[in-house]
Amino acid sequence: MPPTEEPAARPVEPTDDLALALRLADAADAVAMARFDAADLRIDTKPDRTHVTEADLETERAIRRILDAERPDDGILGEEYGSSGDTSRRWVIDPIDGTHNYMRGIPVWATLIALTVDGVPVVGVVSQPALGRRWWAAAGQGAWTTTAAGETRRIRVSGIDEIAASSISFQSVEQWDDVDLVPTLERLTRAVWRDRGYGDALPYMWLAEGRLELVAEFGVKEYDIAAIAPIVREAGGRFTAFDGTDRLDAESSLATNGVLHDAFLTLLHEEDDR
Protein backbone atom coordinates (compact mmCIF):
# COMPACT_ATOMS: atom_id res chain seq x y z
CA MET A 1 0.00 0.00 0.00
CA PRO A 2 1.52 3.39 -0.99
CA PRO A 3 1.95 6.09 1.65
CA THR A 4 -1.08 8.24 2.30
CA GLU A 5 -0.38 11.80 1.17
CA GLU A 6 -2.66 14.81 1.28
CA PRO A 7 -1.33 17.51 -1.07
CA ALA A 8 -2.24 21.00 0.01
CA ALA A 9 -1.68 24.09 -2.12
CA ARG A 10 -2.06 26.33 0.94
CA PRO A 11 -0.75 24.75 4.15
CA VAL A 12 -2.26 25.78 7.44
CA GLU A 13 -0.84 29.09 8.69
CA PRO A 14 1.50 28.21 11.55
CA THR A 15 0.90 29.41 15.08
CA ASP A 16 3.43 31.85 16.54
CA ASP A 17 5.11 29.02 18.46
CA LEU A 18 5.32 26.78 15.42
CA ALA A 19 6.60 29.63 13.26
CA LEU A 20 9.33 30.23 15.84
CA ALA A 21 10.18 26.51 15.95
CA LEU A 22 10.59 26.51 12.17
CA ARG A 23 12.91 29.53 12.38
CA LEU A 24 14.89 27.77 15.08
CA ALA A 25 15.26 24.83 12.70
CA ASP A 26 16.51 27.17 9.97
CA ALA A 27 19.19 28.50 12.30
CA ALA A 28 20.11 25.00 13.44
CA ASP A 29 20.38 23.73 9.87
CA ALA A 30 22.80 26.51 8.95
CA VAL A 31 25.10 25.78 11.88
CA ALA A 32 25.02 21.98 11.62
CA MET A 33 25.48 21.85 7.85
CA ALA A 34 28.46 24.20 8.00
CA ARG A 35 30.47 21.52 9.84
CA PHE A 36 28.88 18.35 8.45
CA ASP A 37 31.48 15.93 7.03
CA ALA A 38 34.29 18.33 7.88
CA ALA A 39 37.70 16.66 8.02
CA ASP A 40 38.67 18.67 11.10
CA LEU A 41 35.41 18.23 13.04
CA ARG A 42 36.17 18.32 16.77
CA ILE A 43 34.76 15.30 18.64
CA ASP A 44 34.83 14.84 22.40
CA THR A 45 33.60 12.13 24.79
CA LYS A 46 31.03 12.99 27.47
CA PRO A 47 31.06 11.48 30.98
CA ASP A 48 28.48 8.88 29.89
CA ARG A 49 30.93 7.72 27.20
CA THR A 50 28.81 9.03 24.32
CA HIS A 51 30.26 11.40 21.76
CA VAL A 52 29.59 15.07 21.25
CA THR A 53 30.84 17.24 18.39
CA GLU A 54 31.48 20.95 18.18
CA ALA A 55 28.40 21.09 15.93
CA ASP A 56 26.14 19.62 18.65
CA LEU A 57 27.26 22.34 21.03
CA GLU A 58 27.11 25.27 18.63
CA THR A 59 23.75 24.20 17.20
CA GLU A 60 22.18 24.13 20.65
CA ARG A 61 23.76 27.48 21.51
CA ALA A 62 22.30 29.01 18.34
CA ILE A 63 18.82 27.78 19.26
CA ARG A 64 19.16 28.99 22.85
CA ARG A 65 20.25 32.47 21.75
CA ILE A 66 17.06 32.91 19.76
CA LEU A 67 14.87 31.54 22.55
CA ASP A 68 16.55 33.74 25.15
CA ALA A 69 15.76 36.76 22.97
CA GLU A 70 12.23 35.86 21.87
CA ARG A 71 10.88 33.62 24.64
CA PRO A 72 12.77 34.74 27.77
CA ASP A 73 10.02 33.50 30.08
CA ASP A 74 9.99 29.96 28.67
CA GLY A 75 12.07 27.11 30.03
CA ILE A 76 14.56 25.13 27.94
CA LEU A 77 15.75 21.53 28.11
CA GLY A 78 18.59 20.66 25.78
CA GLU A 79 20.70 17.55 25.46
CA GLU A 80 24.00 19.39 25.71
CA TYR A 81 23.33 22.25 28.15
CA GLY A 82 20.64 20.80 30.38
CA SER A 83 17.62 22.54 31.85
CA SER A 84 16.97 26.22 32.51
CA GLY A 85 13.86 28.01 33.73
CA ASP A 86 10.93 26.69 35.74
CA THR A 87 7.70 27.22 33.85
CA SER A 88 4.82 25.29 32.32
CA ARG A 89 6.15 26.14 28.84
CA ARG A 90 9.40 24.43 27.96
CA TRP A 91 11.33 24.10 24.72
CA VAL A 92 12.96 20.69 24.35
CA ILE A 93 15.96 20.44 22.03
CA ASP A 94 18.18 17.74 20.62
CA PRO A 95 20.61 19.74 18.49
CA ILE A 96 21.85 16.74 16.52
CA ASP A 97 19.93 13.50 16.95
CA GLY A 98 22.22 10.91 15.41
CA THR A 99 25.59 12.32 16.44
CA HIS A 100 27.40 9.12 15.51
CA ASN A 101 26.02 9.32 11.97
CA TYR A 102 26.91 13.02 11.82
CA MET A 103 30.51 12.47 12.88
CA ARG A 104 30.93 9.66 10.30
CA GLY A 105 29.49 11.71 7.44
CA ILE A 106 26.29 9.67 7.21
CA PRO A 107 23.43 12.07 6.33
CA VAL A 108 20.80 10.43 8.58
CA TRP A 109 20.68 12.88 11.51
CA ALA A 110 18.28 15.60 12.57
CA THR A 111 17.67 18.58 14.79
CA LEU A 112 14.66 17.99 17.05
CA ILE A 113 12.75 20.98 18.45
CA ALA A 114 9.63 20.72 20.61
CA LEU A 115 7.50 22.92 22.79
CA THR A 116 5.83 21.25 25.75
CA VAL A 117 3.09 22.80 27.86
CA ASP A 118 2.57 21.21 31.27
CA GLY A 119 4.69 18.33 30.02
CA VAL A 120 2.61 17.69 26.88
CA PRO A 121 4.35 18.22 23.51
CA VAL A 122 2.24 20.63 21.44
CA VAL A 123 4.74 21.64 18.74
CA GLY A 124 7.32 19.47 17.03
CA VAL A 125 9.86 20.05 14.26
CA VAL A 126 12.23 17.43 12.89
CA SER A 127 14.73 18.85 10.40
CA GLN A 128 17.13 16.69 8.38
CA PRO A 129 19.03 19.20 6.23
CA ALA A 130 21.56 16.72 4.86
CA LEU A 131 18.62 14.91 3.24
CA GLY A 132 16.77 18.12 2.37
CA ARG A 133 13.76 17.09 4.47
CA ARG A 134 11.74 18.62 7.29
CA TRP A 135 8.59 17.58 9.18
CA TRP A 136 6.48 19.58 11.62
CA ALA A 137 3.22 19.63 13.54
CA ALA A 138 1.28 21.65 16.08
CA ALA A 139 -1.70 20.51 18.11
CA GLY A 140 -4.83 20.64 15.97
CA GLN A 141 -2.99 21.69 12.79
CA GLY A 142 -2.05 18.35 11.26
CA ALA A 143 1.39 17.04 10.34
CA TRP A 144 3.35 18.38 7.38
CA THR A 145 6.55 17.85 5.47
CA THR A 146 8.71 19.68 2.98
CA THR A 147 10.33 17.34 0.47
CA ALA A 148 13.78 17.65 -1.09
CA ALA A 149 12.03 19.04 -4.17
CA GLY A 150 10.56 21.86 -2.09
CA GLU A 151 6.98 20.56 -2.08
CA THR A 152 4.98 21.05 1.11
CA ARG A 153 2.31 18.48 1.82
CA ARG A 154 0.22 17.13 4.64
CA ILE A 155 1.06 13.61 5.78
CA ARG A 156 -0.98 10.74 7.24
CA VAL A 157 -0.17 7.36 8.72
CA SER A 158 -1.10 4.20 6.86
CA GLY A 159 -4.41 2.39 7.17
CA ILE A 160 -2.88 -1.09 7.36
CA ASP A 161 -4.85 -3.04 9.95
CA GLU A 162 -3.06 -6.40 10.13
CA ILE A 163 0.19 -7.01 11.97
CA ALA A 164 1.15 -9.61 9.37
CA ALA A 165 1.03 -6.91 6.67
CA SER A 166 2.98 -4.30 8.64
CA SER A 167 6.48 -2.94 8.16
CA ILE A 168 8.37 -1.92 11.29
CA SER A 169 11.60 -0.39 12.57
CA PHE A 170 13.02 -1.60 15.88
CA GLN A 171 16.10 0.68 16.00
CA SER A 172 18.79 -1.75 17.29
CA VAL A 173 19.02 -5.23 18.80
CA GLU A 174 21.34 -3.80 21.46
CA GLN A 175 18.56 -1.57 22.81
CA TRP A 176 16.25 -4.55 23.26
CA ASP A 177 19.05 -6.62 24.78
CA ASP A 178 19.74 -3.86 27.32
CA VAL A 179 16.19 -4.29 28.68
CA ASP A 180 16.17 -8.10 28.37
CA LEU A 181 13.58 -8.09 25.58
CA VAL A 182 15.39 -9.83 22.71
CA PRO A 183 12.87 -12.73 22.80
CA THR A 184 10.08 -10.15 22.51
CA LEU A 185 11.83 -8.58 19.53
CA GLU A 186 12.16 -11.98 17.90
CA ARG A 187 8.45 -12.61 18.38
CA LEU A 188 7.66 -9.21 16.90
CA THR A 189 9.84 -9.65 13.83
CA ARG A 190 8.31 -13.06 13.10
CA ALA A 191 4.80 -11.60 13.28
CA VAL A 192 5.25 -8.74 10.80
CA TRP A 193 5.77 -8.57 7.05
CA ARG A 194 9.06 -6.66 7.15
CA ASP A 195 11.48 -5.36 9.77
CA ARG A 196 14.50 -3.07 9.59
CA GLY A 197 16.61 -1.08 12.04
CA TYR A 198 16.67 2.32 10.34
CA GLY A 199 17.65 4.31 13.43
CA ASP A 200 17.11 7.69 15.07
CA ALA A 201 14.27 10.06 14.10
CA LEU A 202 13.85 9.12 10.44
CA PRO A 203 11.73 5.96 10.85
CA TYR A 204 9.22 7.87 12.99
CA MET A 205 8.83 10.33 10.12
CA TRP A 206 8.37 7.47 7.66
CA LEU A 207 5.69 6.12 9.98
CA ALA A 208 3.96 9.52 9.95
CA GLU A 209 4.12 9.44 6.14
CA GLY A 210 2.47 6.01 6.02
CA ARG A 211 5.58 4.04 5.10
CA LEU A 212 5.91 2.08 8.37
CA GLU A 213 3.41 0.84 10.95
CA LEU A 214 5.56 0.64 14.11
CA VAL A 215 8.74 2.16 15.53
CA ALA A 216 9.95 1.11 18.99
CA GLU A 217 12.94 2.30 20.95
CA PHE A 218 14.52 2.07 24.41
CA GLY A 219 16.93 4.25 26.35
CA VAL A 220 15.42 7.45 24.95
CA LYS A 221 15.34 10.76 26.78
CA GLU A 222 12.68 13.46 26.57
CA TYR A 223 14.75 15.44 24.06
CA ASP A 224 14.91 12.36 21.80
CA ILE A 225 11.14 12.03 21.42
CA ALA A 226 9.33 15.26 22.41
CA ALA A 227 9.45 16.67 18.86
CA ILE A 228 8.45 13.35 17.32
CA ALA A 229 5.30 12.71 19.37
CA PRO A 230 3.15 15.57 18.02
CA ILE A 231 4.10 14.78 14.43
CA VAL A 232 3.07 11.13 14.79
CA ARG A 233 -0.14 12.07 16.62
CA GLU A 234 -1.15 14.85 14.22
CA ALA A 235 -0.56 12.43 11.34
CA GLY A 236 -3.19 10.16 12.88
CA GLY A 237 -0.91 7.74 14.70
CA ARG A 238 -0.36 6.93 18.36
CA PHE A 239 2.76 7.61 20.37
CA THR A 240 3.23 6.11 23.83
CA ALA A 241 5.86 4.59 26.04
CA PHE A 242 6.40 0.83 25.79
CA ASP A 243 3.92 0.34 28.64
CA GLY A 244 1.19 2.22 26.79
CA THR A 245 1.33 5.41 28.88
CA ASP A 246 1.81 8.89 27.42
CA ARG A 247 4.89 9.66 29.53
CA LEU A 248 7.95 11.19 27.89
CA ASP A 249 10.21 10.20 30.79
CA ALA A 250 9.72 6.41 30.62
CA GLU A 251 12.89 5.94 28.51
CA SER A 252 10.97 4.02 25.86
CA SER A 253 8.80 4.85 22.88
CA LEU A 254 6.23 3.01 20.82
CA ALA A 255 4.84 4.75 17.75
CA THR A 256 2.27 3.13 15.47
CA ASN A 257 -0.26 4.00 12.81
CA GLY A 258 -2.89 3.97 15.56
CA VAL A 259 -5.01 1.22 14.07
CA LEU A 260 -2.55 -1.42 15.23
CA HIS A 261 -1.39 0.15 18.49
CA ASP A 262 -3.39 -2.00 20.87
CA ALA A 263 -2.63 -5.14 18.87
CA PHE A 264 1.10 -4.39 19.00
CA LEU A 265 0.92 -3.71 22.74
CA THR A 266 -0.77 -7.08 23.26
CA LEU A 267 1.81 -8.86 21.14
CA LEU A 268 4.76 -7.15 22.82
CA HIS A 269 3.55 -7.92 26.33
CA GLU A 270 2.71 -11.57 25.81
CA GLU A 271 4.73 -13.87 28.03
CA ASP A 272 7.48 -15.74 26.28
CA ASP A 273 6.52 -19.42 26.60
CA ARG A 274 9.80 -20.83 25.45
Image (cartoon, rainbow, N blue to C red):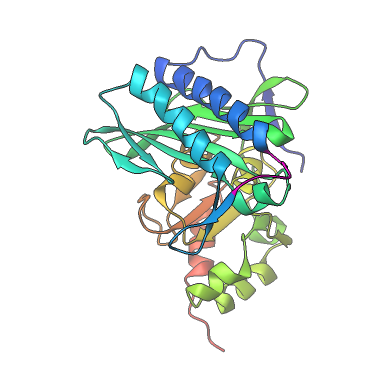
Closer to us: 21 or 117 = 21
The N terminus - image quarter: top right
- Tell me: residue 41, above or below residue 195: above
Determine whether, in the image, residue 203 is placed left or right of residue 148.
left
Pinpoint residue 267: horizontal percent, then vertical percent: 53, 68
- Tell me: residue 262, above or below residue 55: below
Q: Quadrant of residue 152?
A: top right
Residue lying at 62% horizontally and 64% vertically, measured from the top left: 172
Closer to us: 197 or 79 = 79
Q: Look at the magenta stretch and give its main secondary structure.
A: loop
Furthest residue toward left: 86
Please give the range of residues in magenta.
Answer: 36-42
Pinpoint residue 48: horizontal percent, then vertical percent: 44, 63
- Work out whether residue 204 can be spotted: yes
- Work out whether residue 128 can be spotted: no
Marks counted in the figure total 0
Pinpoint residue 131: horizontal percent, then vertical percent: 73, 35
- Tell me: residue 259, above or below residue 73: below
